[in-house]
Amino acid sequence: MGIDGISQKVLTDSLRQMMSDGLAYRHDYHEQPPRVEYGLTELGTKMLPIVNSLADFGNYYKSIIEQN
């Protein structure tokens, strides 16, 4: 299972980097079939307002460009 528009390699590399940076964690349920869950650490959660603000600005800026 993946995310539309993102290759499995890019998703895997991004998750590994986020875990290395202390922003995300991985929980392995040790089940068959295999099941894992990813989530944000406390540090990752604290970054959400910043990331959301950047996304808002990106959407705003895109709308300005599209008007021209």
Image (tube, rainbow, N blue to C red):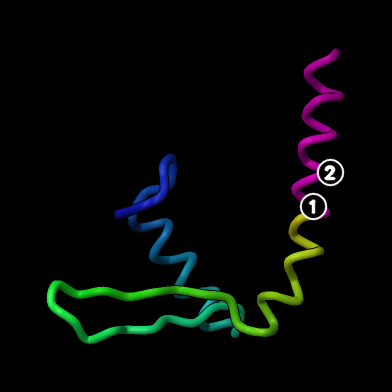
23 relative position to 53: left or right: left
Q: Which residue is mark 1?
A: 54
Q: Residue furthest top?
A: 68
SS at circle 2: helix
Q: Quadrant of residue 34?
A: bottom left
Q: Quadrant of the N terminus?
A: bottom left
How packed mark 2 is, by other alpha carbons closer than 10 Å (few <14, some 14-19, many 20 or more), is few
Q: Residue at x 75, y 48 (%)?
A: 55
Mark-to-mark CA distance, 1 and 2: 5 Å
x and y, in percent, of residue 20 in the image? 52, 83
Q: Quadrant of the C terminus?
A: top right
Q: Are marks 1 and 2 in contact (CB under 8 Å)?
A: yes
Q: Eyeballing the image, is 8 above or below 64?
A: below
Magenta span contains residue 60: yes
Q: How many discs appear?
A: 2
Which SS type dominates the magenta stretch?
A: helix
Magenta span contains residue 18: no
Q: Which residue is mark 2?
A: 57
Q: Residue at x 28, y 84 (%)?
A: 29
x and y, in percent, of residue 27 in the image? 39, 83
How packed mark 1 is, by other alpha carbons closer than 10 Å (few <14, some 14-19, many 20 or more), is few
Q: Quadrant of residue 53?
A: bottom right
The amino acid sitting under disc 2 is: Phe
SS at circle 1: helix
Q: Residue furthest left?
A: 32
Q: Which residues are magenta?
A: 53-68
Q: Eyeballing the image, is 61 above or below 47?
A: above
36 relative position to 3: left or right: left
Q: Residue at x 32, y 75 (%)?
A: 36
Q: Residue at x 52, y 75 (%)?
A: 39
